[in-house]
Amino acid sequence: MALEMGRVGIERVEGWGMSVGSVARVIRPENLDQLRAVLAEARKAGVTLAPRGTGCSYGDASTTEQGWCLDLTHMNRVLSFDESTGDADLEGGATIRQLWRRSLPSGYWPKVVSGTMFPTVGGAAGMNIHGKNNFKVGTFGDNLLEIDLLLANGDLLTCSREQNAELFHGAIGGFGMLGIITRVKTRTQRVYSGDVRVRGISCHDLGEMMEAMQELVDVADYLVGWIDTFGAGSAAGRGLLHDARYLAEGEDSDPGKTLCLEHQDLADSVMGVPKAEIWRVLRLFNHDLGMRLINGVKQVAGRMESMRGWHRQSHGGFNFLLDYVPDWKYAYARQAGEGLIQYQAFLPSETALDGFLALLAEGQASGHVPYLGVLKRHRPDPFLMTHALDGWSLAMDLKVTAKNRAHLWQTCARFSQICLNAGGRFYFAKDQVISPSVARASFGARRIAAFRELKAQADPQGLFSTDLWRRVFEQDPDQRSHGPWPGQA
Ligand SMILES: Cc1cc2nc3c(=O)[nH]c(=O)nc-3n(C[C@H](O)[C@H](O)[C@H](O)COP(=O)(O)OP(=O)(O)OC[C@H]3O[C@@H](n4cnc5c(N)ncnc54)[C@H](O)[C@@H]3O)c2cc1C
């Protein structure tokens, strides 16, 4: 049986931030027949399946304390790429890295990429990820032409805006709960260079950064703000805004060279330290004092970058900055269960500035200052469980230790209250803390009921389930509004 289902093993399966995980039976089918066999076997055994890509979600979106983990990374072929349109057809387990490495030599770059190139396209669709250009091109789902969705009963449906449209809009951003995305067809962006033009704009506070970003939304291709999370008072939310643009046709004197894959490769060392070792150096600074220092140095470096004006950076270098330092997350953990969580709050334009300032102040007051803060501009999209809205997001990386965990969760509960008061949304790719009542207050009871209804139709036996699903959507109704916050006595 093991052979028919693909490779099977018992492994520790963690969220990317390492602060959640458990040992699970992991099954890796290699083709559709094996995948169907896994579904049939799980139905027969009466166990649930947790769909998983490369596990780049920070929290519990693809971990499972019950049932089996269904790792889809071995169904990873690039099926076709149309050089005339830039349309790409890929199996769900192919990665964003595979996509750009196939498309770029022909002059195309994926429309939407995350801050790391390692997610699978199935996982990217499952979370409906956004890039630094969300305000301009929408989410990953907005740029999909169609997907193939394998339902719990083994039926394979092609879903698009025209065909099985309800499932299309539910499964994209549906965190794997409606079925397995076995194929995605996506459009890519025509580019005339392997570089983008970039400039940094140093900002004294959050209001200044948001104003500067807003003024650029009609002309910039990418906008992202780094925030010094230690800035307080009149310096709260100070940081560096990056404005990046595609090069027009003819602007790059040697596109043949910049479109080469080697041009995109990230440097092997930073200031003489081999890339693979940098996380060890970062670990020395992974405490409040060290991070205050790093943020301060970055703020000064940002002012200098601001004076430099426009310069060029490869697409890979600009978009995947975090991949420059392999394994940087290990700087956060000294023992099992430690690591980081990311709290990304999405707030409407009207409340964003005050809401984010309140979040930064709450982090500082509670002793949980985020070690990284990132600001983005967003726009709404038509997907049922979407996180995106006409507004902004602030993503905050928070250190988790065995000692601070319970207190951090309490602080996050206060973050959530601030977000709810501001009419905000949450993003399950980053979440590990929100409760069912917070989800209901944020997404609305009607939206959640519609999603449950769709799941009841697509997966009536509840075959697909993850720790995230059980934490946020399956708790006892009495627990939802009154239950203790995880970690609270
Ligand atoms: C360093 C870093 C930077 C990041 N930057 C960004 C960013 O800029 N923007 C952003 O939006 N996100 C960002 N992310 C989050 C990441 O893009 C998402 O979590 C993405 O969903 C991860 O894809 P994955 O293949 O690792 O899937 P997993 O994390 O393993 O799974 C994601 C979800 O999709 C489901 N799933 C996985 N594969 C399938 C499938 N084939 N069919 C159906 N469901 C499936 C899973 O059950 C789970 O609910 C970042 C993550 C990291 C680690």
Image: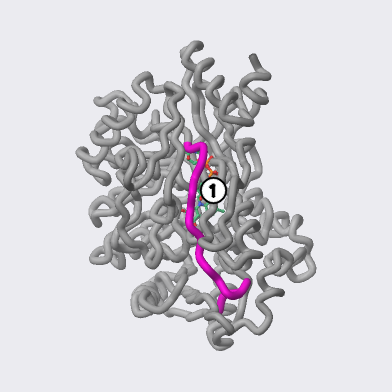
Name the residue nearer the viewer: 370 or 12. 12
Disc 1 crowd rating (10 Å Cα; few below 14, some 14-19, many 20+) is: many
Specify whether 385 is left or right of 463. Answer: left
Q: Residue at x 41, y 75 (%)?
A: 235
Q: Residue at x 33, y 61 (%)?
A: 379
Name the residue nearer the viewer: 357 or 141. 141
Q: Position of residue 88 (x, y in %)?
A: 54, 53
Identify the residue position indicated by label 1 in the image.
89
Name the residue nearer the viewer: 170 or 443. 170
What secondary structure predominates along the stretch shown in magenta? strand
Q: Residue at x 22, y 43 (%)?
A: 444
Rendering quarter of residue 283: bottom right
Q: Position of residue 239 (x, y in %)?
A: 47, 73
Region in magenta: 181-197
Q: Position of residue 454 (x, y in %)?
A: 30, 32
**Mark 1 belongs to which amino acid?**
Asp
